Image (cartoon, rainbow, N blue to C red):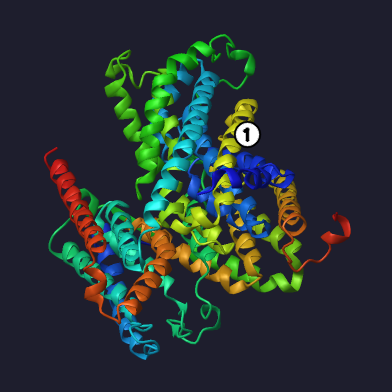
Amino acid sequence: MEIITNRRKATLVATLILTVLFAYLFWRTVSFSPPVLPGYPGDSFFPRLILGFGLIWCALLLYTSIFARTTGVEDDEKEVNFPTAPVALIGVYVLVFVNVLPIIGFELCSFILMFLLLITRWHGELKNRIIKVSLVSLATTVVCYVCFVLLLNVSFPLLFLPNYINF
Amino acid sequence: MDVTGNIVPALGLVFGLHSLAWILLGVFLGIILGALPGFGSSQALALLFPVTFGMSAPDAILFCCAVYSAAEYGGSIPAILIRTPGTPAGAITVLDGYEMTKQGMPYRALKISLFSGVFGGVTSTLIFLIAGTGLALLALEFGPGEMFALGIFGLSIIGGFFGKEPSRGFLATAIGLLLATVGSSRFGGLRFTFDYGPLMDGIPLVVIVIGLLAAPEAFRLLIEHGDTAKDATTDGPAVPDRMADIDPEKNRFTWADARYLLPTWIRNSLIGTAIGAIPGAGASVGALIAYNEERRWNKRRRPEEFGTGIPEGIASPETANNAVVAGTLVPSLALGIPGSGTAAILMGVLVIKGIVPGPGLFEEQTAMILAIFIGLFVANGFMFGVGFWGARVWGQVARIPRRLLGPFVLIMIIIGTYAFKNYAPHVVMVLAIGAIAYYFEKIDIPPVPIMLAFVMGPIVESNLNLAMTIHRGDLMVVLSRPITITILVFSLVTVIYGFMRTKTSLQEKEGG
């Protein structure tokens, strides 16, 4: 699934969202800590400057998107697509990965993720594909383990690899 | 800067077995990642950023410099062999590099690219040490008000010249500055945390770097290159598959060639270093300007000969884009203004290791600065060896289908981010930032200014706060100091120029 629109409309929507967000954040700065030192402008001073600055550019972009243009007509009318389902699917993969990592360990997690992502992209007969993708996924897992765990001392939740590869 | 007193410690930092191994690995990985179509030096560094977590500060910065230099050279490999530039800067190399390959001289083209890159890298490294020291000495005289103005000047260049329109560039800059304020302030107050635990310490730089540079590339590779038909590498390679089909005589690079290309190398080293020192310009602008200037200044060639596979057409962009590497380091290390996404990552590596880039760095960390300087020389030496030896292998790397790269990039991103603090919310943040950056790029809101502003935000804010505290909260006194106001006027001129440039290019476009 994907959203297809032109660049001008997409810019308009994105800028409107940013404008509302900036205005909300500006309102949030009211609750920031007051100045603690004489002369110190306080925690809210710099964020307010940025938000004010951001709102000016949002207004300018809104104006150019509605009334004027700063790029060629073909740029504004250029079709842009926003794939939503593939992005969400990648999100699901990553969320599942980080949540099951402490349970099933780094080895199985990275092997399964690589296998799932590669199997649809590798071409050839299914049996051959499964064998090749399995080998590549296994090799990737071992390389990541050697690089991050053994060489860089990163502590991942591990299941069995340290019993076989260690130095 | 006490060079003589620090040269021995600097040599010790570079020529330790560990450091040499990291530089060699950096060169090796940099060439491979640079050779992959679509991977620029900033993407390569963002992807390899997590590898630096376990290293000491000098090793980490030397490793990153090696990756940066090598990736710029690596980008020329697919440009020459398969007409697919690995880095944006490599797009100019395609013009003559691919033509030379079609004439049966792929390895001669690769050798010209390598020799030119090494010459550009070495020359600009020399200039870096001299110019960086001078600039840092000048900046040491600046107070917090002037440093704040300098930061604003950097932001005005970043916002005004990155991307298609300044309004989008400045919007991106505002987003980056805003992200930098998330978390606890210097006085302990919490900002924009929404009582959400993972935001209390702010957004780590590693999350921003990987989220803005590597993650959108992963999304692109996974979503837009899932089909072989869209693979750029299927674009009819001109290089023969069998080595026996390549005439070794035609592919030689001799001393006579080197002597012939010397004026081109010198000219373009200077151009590349100068372009690199300008924030926002980067390797692609350096390569483009170098190519155009070479056409203008080269008396031995007619302009129309460029694009037909002549050595100068490869040497000029390749010298310049490698010279940009050390040039970029000048404002980044001397002033704390990152000139490009890659320079921001290098600055980030220093910050994570507890070293603050800026004028003081040249005084306080002289050995480190000298080590970077010597390390760049060594990296160029290794690049020469690895590039020369592996010319044939790198050609094969460039042919890896893009559809297969996505899973590897994604797994590196997940594991690399998780490795930072073994903290799952960081991975989720990378994913969210990456998805937003991926969508932003579709409407020409560039992610690089977001990252640059994120790096510069704390520097600008702390200098502003310090200046205001010194002047009892009077902003007008801070802004009206002579150097401050001069720099701020320059910033305003830069912003206006950015808008005028866009307007002029629009008028030219409409005029046909």
Across and down, in percent, residue A134 comes to 73, 51
The chain to which mark 1 is attached is B
Q: Is residue B442 above or below residue B316?
A: below
Q: Quadrant of residue B95?
A: top left
Residue B307: % across, % down:
35, 22
In this rendering, the answer to whether B68 lies above or below B56 is: above
Q: Amino acid at mark 1?
A: Phe
Kind of element beneath mark 1: helix
Q: Position of residue B431 (x, y in %)?
A: 52, 66
Q: Nearer the viewer, residue B308 or B224?
A: B308
Q: Judge whether residue B236 can be spotted in this image.
A: no
Q: Quadrant of residue B419?
A: bottom right
Front-most of B473 and A21?
B473
The residue positioned 21% from the left and 49% from the top of the image is: A74
Which is nearer the eye, B293 or A143?
B293
Q: Residues within 10 Å of mark 1 (few under 14, many from 20)?
A: many
| Rendered location of residue A163, percent (x, y) | 88, 60
Q: Nearer the viewer, residue A147 or B140?
A: B140
Give the residue at mark 1: B382
Q: How many marks?
A: 1
Q: Can you see residue A131?
A: yes
Left or right? Give the position of B287 relative to A98: left
**Left or right of A103 on screen, residue B45:** left
Residue at position x 43%, y 18% in the image: B261
Q: Quadrant of the C terminus of chain B?
A: top left
